[in-house]
Amino acid sequence: QVQLVESGGGLVQPGGSLRLSCAASGFTLDYYAIGWFRQAPGKEREGVSCISSSDGSTYYADSVKGRFTISRDNAKNTVYLQMNSLKPEDTAVYYCATAGSSWCQPNLHEYDYWGQGTQVTVSS
């Protein structure tokens, strides 16, 4: 059974850092791109970052470039999202997902398997 489980969310002050984890089970992450998405209250789900498995390419939304870093540890079957210099507007539920492809897909609707999400709240 394909499963993705996010962890690492929490409450952090503006300027702080968090590291989110996306642990996979039921399949080997080595062969699949993994994307991170987020959804704030009253807003649509949006793409945050993605890492391919084919060549390790990474992608970031403009709003997080220079602050977030995506990485993968295939030995642990886990993808990470290091989030630094957090802002209140980063507050959202963060999800990881895979489209079953080794390449990152541009459209979130192409992602078939999703985790349950982890809440990130940036507030003083």
Image: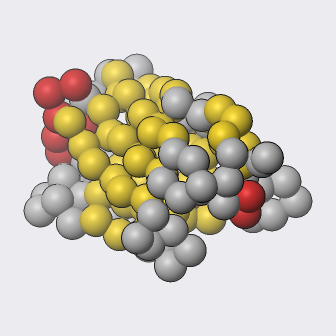
Q: Position of residue 31 (x, y in %)?
A: 18, 45
Name the residue located 17 percent from the left edge and 40 percent from the top edge. 30
Q: Is residue 98 left or right of residue 121?
A: left
Q: Position of residue 12 (x, y in %)?
A: 66, 40
Residue 87 visible, this orientation:
yes
Quadrant including the N terminus? top left
Residue 42 in the image: above or below residue 65: above
Q: Is residue 85 left or right of residue 14?
A: left
Query: Which of these two is toward me, 109 or 36?
Result: 36
Name the residue located 51 percent from the left edge and 41 percent from the top edge. 18
Q: Position of residue 85 (x, y in %)?
A: 53, 58
Q: Position of residue 19 (x, y in %)?
A: 45, 39
Q: Is residue 20 left or right of residue 14?
A: left
The residue sitting at the right extreme is 42
Residue 76 in the image: above or below residue 52: above
Name the residue located 57 percent from the left edge and 48 percent from the top edge. 16
Residue 110 visible, this orientation:
no
Quadrant for residue 4, please give it: top left
Residue 39 in the image: above or below residue 8: below
Name the residue located 42 percent from the left edge and 34 percent from the top edge. 22
Q: Is residue 71 left or right of residue 114?
A: left
How does the figure colour the protein chain or chains? secondary structure
Query: Which of these two is toward me, 120 or 84?
Result: 84
Query: Which of these two is toward me, 109 or 69?
Result: 69
Residue 27 in the image: above or below residue 35: above
For the image, the number of numbered tags is: 0
Quadrant for residue 25, please give it: top left
